[in-house]
């Protein structure tokens, strides 16, 4: 458990700091990506989960662009939020990457509704910060795995 907490703290600090230094608009998205990708100790899905997060979010940003760039009315955006929530709930337990095709438009549409910023900047921030956080998490996972392989096994 201590390793998991240390991974999350180190990853969140690293990703958040890098996002702040890079000057992207939503540094907390990098932190969220780290926490979403880092597994409990010994879990096997961590590397694939990082790639699912990057690919699923990027494709979700494309879907979001198709929705937000034309500037639809608020009623359409509320429908997108509802469909995003439904799709996320249906898919999150089955395939994380596919769920992000719904989670991303849901999250970005809510952000757009609550604090509008230029849509292209919003989309670019989401992709960059998700990749940043996922890469930080992936580096941590690989470092922890390499360290575990170097440790001699204790006689049982």
Image (spheres, helix red, strand yellow):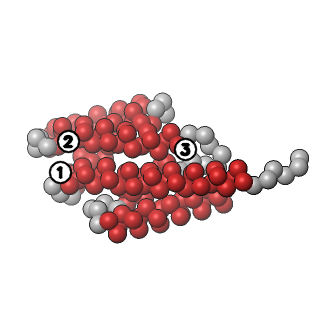
Of the image marks 3 and 1, the number of the one nearer the N terminus: 3
The reply to whether residue 32 is visible in this rendering is no
User: Quarter holding the N terminus?
Assistant: bottom right
- Residue 42, image x, y percentages: 66, 46
Rendered image quadrant of residue 101: top left
- Residue 52 location, x and y as percent? 43, 39
Q: Nearer the viewer, residue 143 or 94?
A: 143
Instruction: Choose the circle earlier in sequence order: 1 or 2.
Output: 2
Q: Secondary structure at mark 1?
A: helix
Outermost residue on the right side: it is 156
Q: Which is more N-terminal, label 2 or label 3?
A: 3
Say few, some or many: other residues with alpha carbon within 10 Å of mark 2 (under 14 / 14 to 19 / 20 or more): some
Q: Which residue is mark 1?
A: 119
Q: Name the residue that disc number 2 marks.
A: 65
Q: Residue at x 54, y 44 (%)?
A: 46
User: Residue 19 at x, y = what percent?
Assistant: 36, 63
Disc 1 to disc 2, C-alpha distance: 8 Å
Q: Decide: marks 1, 2 in contact (CB < 8 A)?
A: yes
Asked if residue 27 can be seen in this view, the reply is yes
Q: Which residue is mark 3?
A: 46
Q: Nearer the viewer, residue 108 or 125?
A: 125
């Amino acid at each position: 458990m201590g390793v998991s907490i240390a991974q999350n703290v180190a990853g969140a600090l690293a990703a958040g700091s890098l996002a702040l230094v890079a000057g992207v608009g939503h540094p907390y998205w990098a932190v969220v990506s780290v926490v979403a990708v880092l597994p409990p100790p010994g879990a096997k899905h961590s590397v694939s989960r990082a790639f699912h997060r990057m690919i699923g979010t990027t494709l979700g940003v494309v879907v979001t662009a198709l929705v937000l760039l034309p500037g639809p009315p608020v009623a359409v955006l509320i429908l997108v939020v509802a469909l995003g929530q439904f799709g996320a709930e249906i898919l999150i337990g089955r395939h994380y990457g596919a769920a992000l095709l719904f989670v991303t438009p849901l999250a970005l549409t809510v952000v757009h509704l609550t604090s509008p910023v230029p849509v292209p900047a919003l989309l670019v921030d989401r992709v960059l910060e998700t990749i940043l956080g996922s890469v930080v998490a992936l580096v941590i996972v690989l470092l922890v795995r390499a360290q575990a392989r170097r440790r001699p096994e204790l006689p049982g």
